[in-house]
Image (spheres, rainbow, N blue to C red):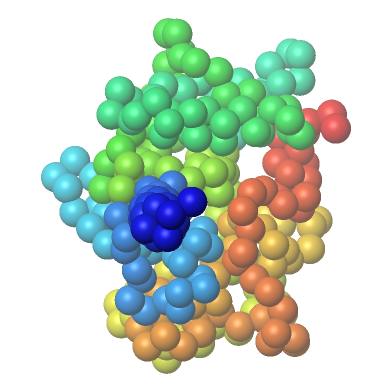
Amino acid sequence: MATSTVILLVCLLGTLNTVQCQHEEANPEDVENNGEIDSIPVEENYTVSALIERANKNAGQELDDPEIVEGDIAVYTGLQNADPCTSRGCKWQRSSNGNVYVPYVIANQFSQRERAIIEKGLQSFAQSTCIRFTRRTSQKDYVNIQSRSGCWSYVGRRGGEQVVSLARSGCVYHQVVQHELLHALGFNHEQCRSDRDSHVRILYQNIIRGLEYAFNKINTNNLGTPYDYGSVMQYGRYAFSRNRQATIVPYPNPNSVIGKASQMSRMDIMRINRLYGCRR
């Protein structure tokens, strides 16, 4: 083979490799809008809390959005200090066959790929709990999954149409879908548990000014389960940081891994089954 031909083939192969690498680096499934979270170290970018924090910069600012507290929990305006679940039953009803059917609709805003991710998140509950997300027909109470401004949900069943927002720009990830649906089923964040002070330290000096309330401790029903650093409801070490310093530090071992869940933990599943009396 002539020397000039060999050189030409080498150049062509080098060009193809460069194009392939550029394509892989720009894959939208791996990097959403090529964005970075200014106050979060790069290695934390895909924790649940980091994904939600990035997507929720403008959450709650649209005219028809609810007020958003604790990062991604929607509340009735004017009732910020009262949990609706304490004044009325907010669990979804269990049927005579032992399953809990939660009707849902998914808005047409989502692409086929996004819808598949959301559906996978919905159906994942049926694999290990008695929760069955089913397409709505005419049920009065149902979850309406939309792409609004950010990732957010109400806590528990509120009655009637109940929006769960999964913004296309940053929220359509399996762990975020599960996180927001767990809110809709009645669960709060792990770091807000009533017993959290025995397991984590909240470093308020590192939290973005005005967002300290996102770490308020709640009088939760912990269902006889231990604190779980691996819960999909546990925010990451740098959640709402204003200075790239940790806001949540495990205690007594500060080196414990927290907030890295890519899906519901064994303890998340146990809590669902205990709260809803699933025969599992």
109 horizontally vs 22: left or right: left
231 horizontally vs 12: left or right: right
Q: Is residue 255 above or below residue 38?
A: below
Q: Position of residue 31 (x, y in %)?
A: 40, 56
Which image quarter: residue 89? Answer: top right
Which image quarter: residue 260? Answer: bottom right
Q: Position of residue 218 (x, y in %)?
A: 56, 64
Q: Residue furthest top?
A: 138
Which image quarter: residue 277? Answer: top right
Looking at the picture, tell me which residue is in the foreground, 237 or 90: 237
> Image point 76% across, 14% down: which residue?
97
How many marks on residues? 0
Q: Is residue 225 visible?
A: yes
Q: Is residue 55 above or below residue 156?
A: below
276 horizontally vs 112: left or right: right
Q: Position of residue 253 (x, y in %)?
A: 75, 86
Q: Position of residue 187 (x, y in %)?
A: 58, 49
Looking at the picture, tell me which residue is in the foreground, 49 or 42: 42
Which image quarter holds the C terminus? top right
Q: Residue furthest front?
A: 2
Looking at the picture, tell me which residue is in the foreground, 67 or 38: 38
Looking at the picture, tell me which residue is in the foreground, 111 or 210: 111
